[in-house]
């Protein structure tokens, strides 16, 4: 037997009220509307509205029609349910088609390539998939969440100019974070976890990432690692998914180990010291005093400030390695601090590891 490889669907752009079926049944029974009114106890006006789809067939009405016509109440109820469902789909499609311009602001191609949304030929269906990705039922609902003035992320210039890509990256992080089981957040546990994670900087990603995630999750923090998106020049973000669960979101923007680790400890600073109500974006700007405070936390956690003078006059790779060994951190982090202090951005780069997505 031949079987088509392509699956075809039929989704009509019209809805047939069950009243049409009722008319056909009346004709087959040679029954007038007035007679049906008498037999069912329904007014002629009610039957007229049912015929036009203006009045629903209730369970009680379906039972009366079963006794009167011999056709089961279940069938009448099913017809009514299918009609209302199709009406809802038509209204939804009309709303989707009116919101297609918004879709142009979302990086749907990139999201499809990442497997975050399903490829769709019709724009209205693609819009529906995109709303499902964001976990909202409409574009106005998306705006309420992602364009809310109180959201700290809007302080980022990127979020104001490219809200689509920015919100997509954050949403990818949320989805991954929701899939990570965490114990309820405990500030003291997370503070101790941060100290232990600092010692992981000497290891390779294959080793330190599972350990990082485990230490974070046991303290109520979900660590999400999501590749950077085009037009989103952010290193990391922090967002509370609930009062008992925080998300730290990182990428490999810059690709060097010193940037990765600084970003993590920066976000850890937000988690430990700032409000649970806001979203914190590490975009490199320092207009917000909380960002400066998180920077100081990250810098001091990795390398005490009183060593900066000594680091700034290091002369050789061996000097870098000696101080890194003493601090129990990766030499690449010391190189990053040296470059920041001296503005000599290429010196000792051979001691920096580069991370990449596998």
Image (cartoon, rainbow, N blue to C red):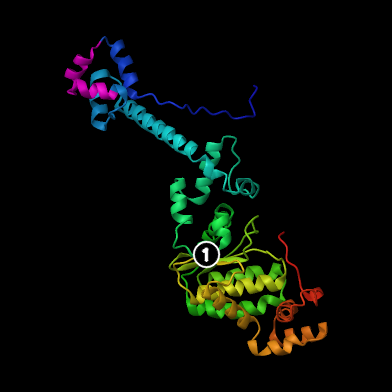
Quadrant showing the C terminus:
bottom right
Name the residue nearer the viewer: 344 or 260.
344
| Main secondary structure found in the magenta portion | helix
Report the side of 187 relative to 17 (left or right): right
Name the residue nearer the viewer: 251 or 196.
251
Q: Residue at x 39, y 31 (%)?
A: 87
In this figure, which residue is indicated by the disc labeled 1?
A: 155
- Helix, strand or loop status at disc 1: helix
Quadrant showing the N terminus:
top right
Q: Quadrant of residue 217?
A: bottom right
Residue 19 in the magenta stretch? The answer is no
Q: Which residue is drawn at 76% across and 71% down?
A: 353
Report the side of 4 relative to 48 (left or right): right
Where residue 301 sits: x, y (%)? Answer: 61, 82
Q: Give neighbour class at mark 1: few <14, some 14-19, many 20+ (Cα, 10 Å).
A: some
Where residue 215 sits: x, y (%)? Answer: 57, 73
Q: Which residue is drawn at 60% across and 66% down?
A: 283
Name the residue nearer the viewer: 231 or 250.
231
Residue 46 in the magenta stretch? The answer is yes
Q: What stretch is highlighted in magenta?
A: 31-50
Q: In which quarter of the image is residue 145?
A: bottom left
Name the residue nearer the viewer: 264 or 204.
264
Residue 162 visible, this orientation: yes
Q: Tell me if residue 33 comes above or below residue 218 in the rendering.
A: above
Q: Which residue is drawn at 51% across and 76% down?
A: 272
Where residue 68 sits: x, y (%)? Answer: 23, 19
Where residue 195 sits: x, y (%)? Answer: 59, 81
Residue at the far top: name it. 30
Q: Tell me if residue 81 comes above or below residue 206 in the rendering.
A: above
Q: Tell me if residue 118 comes above or below residue 348 in the rendering.
A: above
Report the side of 288 relative to 59 (left or right): right
């Amino acid at each position: 037997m031949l079987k088509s490889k392509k699956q075809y669907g039929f989704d009509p752009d019209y809805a047939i009220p069950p009243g049409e079926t009722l008319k056909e049944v009346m004709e087959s029974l040679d029954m007038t509307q007035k007679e049906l009114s008498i037999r069912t106890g329904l007014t002629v006006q009610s039957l007229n509205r049912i015929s036009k789809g203006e009045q629903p067939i209730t369970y009680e009405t379906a039972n009366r029609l079963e006794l009167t016509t011999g056709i089961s109440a279940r069938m009448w109820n099913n017809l009514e349910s299918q009609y209302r469902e199709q009406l809802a789909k038509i209204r939804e499609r009309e709303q989707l088609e009116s919101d297609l311009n918004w879709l142009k602001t979302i990086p749907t191609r990139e999201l499809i390539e990442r497997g975050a949304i399903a490829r769709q030929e019709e724009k209205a269906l693609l819009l529906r998939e995109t709303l499902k990705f964001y976990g909202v039922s409409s574009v106005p609902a998306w705006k309420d969440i992602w364009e809310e003035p109180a959201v700290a992320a809007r302080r980022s210039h990127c979020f104001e100019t490219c809200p689509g890509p920015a919100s997509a990256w954050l949403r990818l992080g949320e989805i991954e974070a929701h899939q990570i089981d965490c114990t309820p957040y405990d500030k003291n546990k997370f503070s101790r976890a941060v100290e232990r994670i600092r010692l992981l900087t000497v290891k390779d990603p294959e080793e330190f990432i599972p350990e990082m995630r485990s230490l974070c999750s046991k303290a109520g923090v979900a660590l999400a690692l999501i590749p950077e998106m085009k037009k989103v020049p952010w290193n990391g973000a922090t967002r509370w998914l609930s009062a008992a669960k925080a998300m730290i979101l990182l990428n490999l923007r810059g690709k060097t180990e010193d940037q990765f680790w600084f970003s993590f400890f920066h976000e850890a600073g937000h988690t430990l010291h700032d409000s649970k109500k806001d979203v914190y974006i590490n975009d490199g700007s320092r207009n917000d005093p909380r960002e400066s405070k998180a920077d100081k936390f990250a810098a001091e956690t990795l390398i005490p400030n009183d060593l900066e003078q000594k680091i700034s006059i290091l002369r050789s790779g061996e000097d870098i390695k000696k101080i890194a060994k003493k601090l129990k951190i990766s030499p690449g982090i010391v190189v990053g601090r040296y470059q920041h202090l001296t503005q000599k951005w290429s010196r000792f780069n051979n001691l920096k590891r580069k991370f990449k997505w596998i």
